[in-house]
Amino acid sequence: MEKRASPMASLLFIALLISAFHSSSEAADSQPSFGDNFSIMWSEDHFKTSEDGNTWYLSLDKETGCGFQTKQRYRFGWFTMKLKLVGGDSAGVVTAYYMCSENGAGPERDELDFEFLGNRTGQPYLIQTNVYKNGAGNREMRHMLWFDPTEDYHSYSILWNNHQIVFFVDRVPIRVFKNNGDDKNDFFPNEKPMYLFSSIWNADEWATRGGLEKTDWKKVPFISSYKDFSVEGCRWEDPYPACVSTTTENWWDQYQAWHLSDSQKMDYAWVQRNLVVYDYCKDYDRFPKLPGECSLSPWD
Ligand SMILES: *[C@@H]1O[C@H](CO)[C@@H](O)[C@H](O)[C@H]1NC(C)=O
Ligand SMILES: *[C@@H]1O[C@H](CO)[C@@H](O)[C@H](O)[C@H]1NC(C)=O
């Protein structure tokens, strides 16, 4: 018993040290008050903030939704936020969390999207992801989740480097969008720095069961909550920040981040088997000839 206790104790001690170090460094550089990093894009009166300023509540009513964006732009990195989505009857309501090179739907924009599609009470949310380059999108995938995203906060993250874009839910990779480094994928957004955005709006023309389920305005307000934004990435500075050219100095650009790890591959395989509801790369009705990037393997 004694012999076992001491290595356990020292392991525990090390774990404590690591977590103490981790949380203090996090507090120092990536968890300031929400307002330090974001500006409100529209409908200021539809925002509420927790007392400490670190949780934001976005609401939608019949009049309008609302949205915010980061003050900074980034090119490559790891971007993460915790969200808790509108509960109860949320049919027709879409909460979006995305990166985009412009703060409008400009014809040249690059964009990486998470969209949470609400549903009637008790029916499951779907999560839709999409990729845009130079204003063109049509790269939708839809997944079910393995938990109720309205009950608690979960983290939604994007890893972006010149080799892949990976969408994560609670650190489980649900989607991998590859760049093979040559012309096969000319649809890989890698040139334009992007802001992060989030918004809530009424999309009952298409969101829930293809638009059959309408928003029930008797249930207003619809509220999604946000906290724990963090970025480890290259912050853009004109004309060109140093972190973009010294790419291999940062973990998100290094070899390990160019591919899924072995354990990520296992998680990803499980998601592929169980949770994919729609994949544009399998939609031959829509694409008699599939887009080029569909032939790139997520396992490479
Ligand atoms: C958030 O804003 C603070 C204050 O301006 C800044 O120090 C910090 O680096 C910003 N965080 C990110 C992820 O850009
Ligand atoms: C909503 O629930 C219905 C019925 O369970 C399901 O078919 C649909 O995929 C769900 N999600 C959306 C966004 O329509």
Image (cartoon, helix red, strand yellow):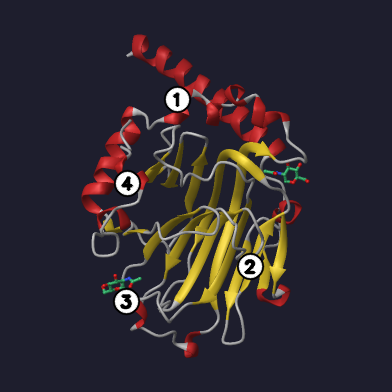
Q: Choose the circle earlier in sequence order: 4 or 1.
A: 1
Of tags 4 and 2, the one toward the viewer is: 4
* Residue, disc 3: 209
Label 3 lies in ligand 2 vicinity (Cβ under 8 Å): yes
Say which quarter of the image contains residue 190. Answer: top right
- From the top left corner, tell me how far across and down residue 256 is, in percent: 45, 25
Instruction: Give the mark nearer the N terminus: 2 vs 1.
Output: 2
Q: Which residue is mark 4?
A: 294
Residue 256 image label:
1
Q: Are marks 2 and 1 in contact (CB under 8 Å)?
A: no
Q: Disc number at residue 67? A: 2
The CA span between labels 3 and 4 is: 26 Å
Q: Nearer the viewer, residue 216 or 147?
A: 216
Residue at image point 61% right, 86% down? 63
Q: CA distance from mark 4 to mark 1?
A: 22 Å
Ligand 1, what quadrant? top right
